[in-house]
Image (tube, grey):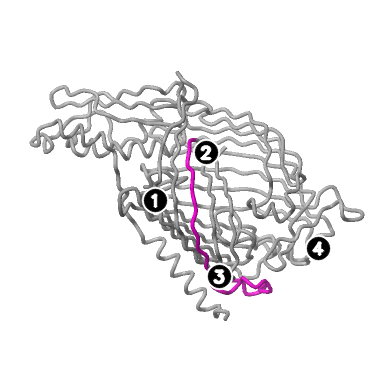
Amino acid sequence: MIRKPEKSLALLFAMLSIFHGRAMSALSDMEPVACIRDSVPISATAQLFEIGRISISGNRITRGYIIERELPFKGGDSLSLEAITESFAKIRERLINTRLFNEVEVSLKEFRGYTIDIQIDVKERWYIFPLPYVRPVDRNFTAWADEGYSLKRFDYGLKYSHYNFTGRNDFLRIWLITGYMKEVELAYDKPNTGKELKHGFGAGFLYGGQDELDLATYQNKQVFVNRDSLLNAGKFMQEQMNFSFRYYYRPGLRTRHFLRLSFNNVKIDSSVLLFNPDYFLNNRRNIFYPELSYMIRYNNIDYVPYPTRGFFFEGGLLKRGINSDMNMWQLNARTSEAFSFAPKMYFVSEDLGLLRVPFKQPFYNQQLLGYNEFYLRGLERYVVDGVACILARNTVLRELTHFNVPFLRGTAHDHIPFRIYAKAYVDAGYVYDKYFNLNSMVNRPLYTGGVGIDVVTFYDFVFRAEFSVNQFGEKGVFFHIRNEF
């Protein structure tokens, strides 16, 4: 049975309001803290101690003040010993989440009366990745399998990424991609500038062309058309150019604000409108539009790529286009909450919501379920287009083991850490579309469940193997890989 649109939208707004109001304190399990505190007389924990010298080692490239920016105290501050030591776990989490370091250790270095010196030891990551780039373009392994594991569905080229470019946690990337897509991208981001490192900026340019385009959705699957299959096709099925400018503001340790302005030009082949007249509005083949977006992010979680403790919130507002050719407002929100409820066992809840208005949008603005972070485990084969969506993913984790594998001895990469988790999960979602509602999964509740194994290692690499079943009785084993380089 299809829900009435009014009830669906009320449910969406209720979910978005919940996102804004939820909060949760992150937990910590740093063992060295307790050992240090136990060596001090109990009466000393009520005494205020002055922060003395803060020594940092291992940062061959990273500037010291970039590390100190993540600290909840500075030299000269007076805190209780308990407050100082309990902050060490959070310091480690923040430094790891900068994605500059493989390992971080924070300790009390020396007592000088009621002055305490702090020691921070870091192991830096590799920051330069001039990598040959080879990657399938489909949404996941299952979508690639549906295309017959075709080697034509690969991008390849050179992807030069230079993290921590000047030691200030800045990022330079130069991508030269060919194959399935042709793409040139130049971008630079420097999120820490100014006397207090609260401001940042970035800019980028992208040019891309596609020989094949998904220009419609049929039976909840993408429909692709390749220019080689058409007579008198143009240079590309779709060609785009983008200039973007970014501003960052970080008033505190956990909250960041992002403002982005871009100018976009998109051109499609004339055959696209023959297959899907609603790909763009007004029967246009070439559109130019500005896009302005704002996002706020609150991060109080232990490890963003694979959280097991803490709370994360992200919310944003986007305006795409200013006239009848392109006109869309988008509101979105995402939360992640995680906590430990037993030794080595964790519960993780992720909630997402999105709303686009006006409801009548071209196919170009319709991608929703099955893309990026909007997915349900067990529906990897499908996509669901729409203008509003709510999702909830709930997972119970059990850490099975963790170990290190020797690697490059005598370097900052002398071992590779591995953590392996077993999990069980239940997902649910709903996608709404008032106008393009011919696909069977739109305007109805969706739910899935399953079990799996996750492998987490360095450089934010997460491998997931999952056995899932959905409400239609379909079962399957699905694989996912996540990495940040």
Residue identifier under label 4: 273
Give the distance between the C-alpha atoms of the residues marked 4 and 2, in whole angstroms.
Answer: 38 Å
Going from N to C along the chain, the mark reached first, 3 or 2, is 2
Q: Is residue 464 left or right of residue 308?
A: right
Give the distance between the C-alpha atoms of the residues marked 3 and 2, in whole angstroms.
Answer: 45 Å
**Which amino acid does the dot numbered 4 rest on?**
Leu
Looking at the picture, tell me which residue is in the foreground, 68 or 201.
Answer: 68
Q: Position of residue 348 (x, y in %)?
A: 40, 55
Of labels 3 and 4, the one closer to you:
3
Going from N to C along the chain, the mark reached first, 3 or 4, is 4
> Does the magenta portion include 444?
yes
Give the distance between the C-alpha atoms of the residues marked 2 and 1, in whole angstroms.
Answer: 40 Å
Circle 1 sits in a helix, a strand or a loop, which is it?
strand
Circle 2 sits in a helix, a strand or a loop, which is it?
strand
**Which amino acid does the dot numbered 2 rest on?**
Phe
Numbered range of the magenta stretch:
432-458
Q: Assign the N terminus to one quadrant of the image.
A: bottom right
Of labels 3 and 2, the one closer to you:
3
Q: Which mark is residue 201?
A: 2
Query: What residue appears at the point 36 percent right and 61 percent down from the top-left corner?
Result: 21
Going from N to C along the chain, the mark reached first, 1 or 4, is 4
Query: What residue appears at the point 64 percent right and 50 percent down from the top-left corner?
Result: 141
Give the distance between the C-alpha atoms of the residues marked 1 and 4, in whole angstroms.
Answer: 50 Å
Instruction: Mark 3: give few (<14), some (14-19) or many (20+) Cα within 10 Å.
Output: few
Q: Indicate whether 362 appears above or below 97.
A: below
Q: Indicate whether 220 appears above or below 82.
A: below
Residue identifier under label 3: 471
Of labels 4 and 2, the one closer to you:
4
Circle 4 sits in a helix, a strand or a loop, which is it?
helix
